[in-house]
Image (cartoon, helix red, strand yellow):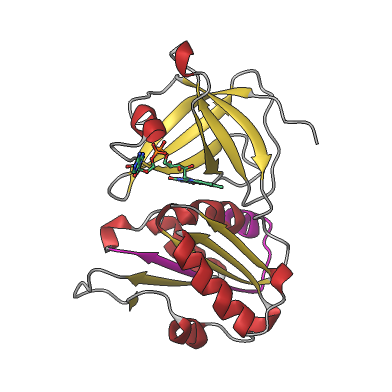
Amino acid sequence: MPMPQMIDYKIVKIEKDGLNVKRFHLESVNGTAISFKPGQFVNLYIKTPPEEALLFRQFSIASAPSNRILEFCIKILPDGKFTSKLDKMNIGDLLGVIGPFGHFNYDGNNGSVFIAGGTGIAPMMSMLRYIKENKITGDFTIFYTNKKEDMILYYDELKEFQNSGIKIVFTLTQENPESWKGETGRINNEMMERHVQIAEKKSWYCCGPLEFVKIIKEFALGKGVEPAKIKIEGWG
Ligand SMILES: Cc1cc2nc3c(=O)[nH]c(=O)nc-3n(C[C@H](O)[C@H](O)[C@H](O)COP(=O)(O)OP(=O)(O)OC[C@H]3O[C@@H](n4cnc5c(N)ncnc54)[C@H](O)[C@@H]3O)c2cc1C
């Protein structure tokens, strides 16, 4: 398949989320937008100054495909080559976009389990926004793990998904605030057993650090889920 062309996008909005994450909203400069499936990623290129023309990294799209503005949810690493530069960019600055890529996308099953850690929520947001927009009803459960409550990304929007019949299980691994009503500790087999019924009929989506996605995959396989129904995206 030919490599998709690079399209210029400009930053139209930047929001802070969690402790060290920024949400970048990008709009195509000439109106040609990429078309993608919920869950896919693109290569983002920092184009200025010219000598850095080839500096790029992969990022999952967090917006729904119907939205002409692309949204990304990016953890800023002070010593990260790409993200430290991105951190200094402002509204109006240009980024190159090549894509979409990847097979980590929603398969239309209305019984699905989404499991994410930290910025791993980005591709899930695209899928969940798609599900909500298209009024797809069914049995959806999201497990979302973070170290501390103030690190939870898209907190308000995720809580609102509960009003659309989507079950959200938040878990914190490094604190247990007095008012906390969610789970504590890492997502493990016992936690998944408690919250997911008829696991084998569901599609499973997991995004986060490599070690984490491995554990979830093993659990789903152990439950008799067909390998084709287990989609994983690991980074970090
Ligand atoms: C499919 C896919 C989707 C992704 N989606 C997202 C997303 O939605 N959001 C997101 O935040 N990230 C996402 N990522 C990760 C992203 O592509 C980058 O890897 C990440 O942003 C770090 O890039 P960087 O250039 O800032 O850091 P890098 O410079 O690549 O460094 C990464 C880490 O390695 C360390 N490091 C660098 N050099 C060395 C060295 N020589 N020795 C030891 N350690 C070193 C740095 O300290 C840093 O912690 C995705 C990755 C993939 C593969």
- 4 lies left or right of 146: right
On screen, 59 above or below 162? above
**Going 69% across and 48% down the picture, which residue do you hit?**
37
Q: Identify the magenta region.
A: 129-147
- 129 lies left or right of 201: left
- The percent position of residue 178, horizontal first and vertical second, equals 19, 75
Q: Please identify the residue farthest to the top as the structure is shown.
A: 50
Q: Is residue 144 magenta?
A: yes
Is 149 or 226 nearer to us in this picture? 226
Is 203 or 129 nearer to us in this picture? 203
On screen, 208 above or below 204? above
Ligand 1 location (quadrant): top left
- 1 lies left or right of 230: right
**Going 59% across and 86% down the picture, which residue do you hit?**
197
Q: Does the rendering let one see residue 167?
A: no
On screen, 20 above or below 164? above
- 69 lies left or right of 149: right
Q: Is residue 130 magenta?
A: yes
On screen, 68 above or below 89? below
**Going 29% across and 63% down the picture, which residue do you hit?**
147
- The percent position of residue 9, horizontal first and vertical second, equals 56, 24
- The percent position of residue 126, horizontal first and vertical second, equals 58, 51
Q: Quadrant of the N terminus?
A: top right
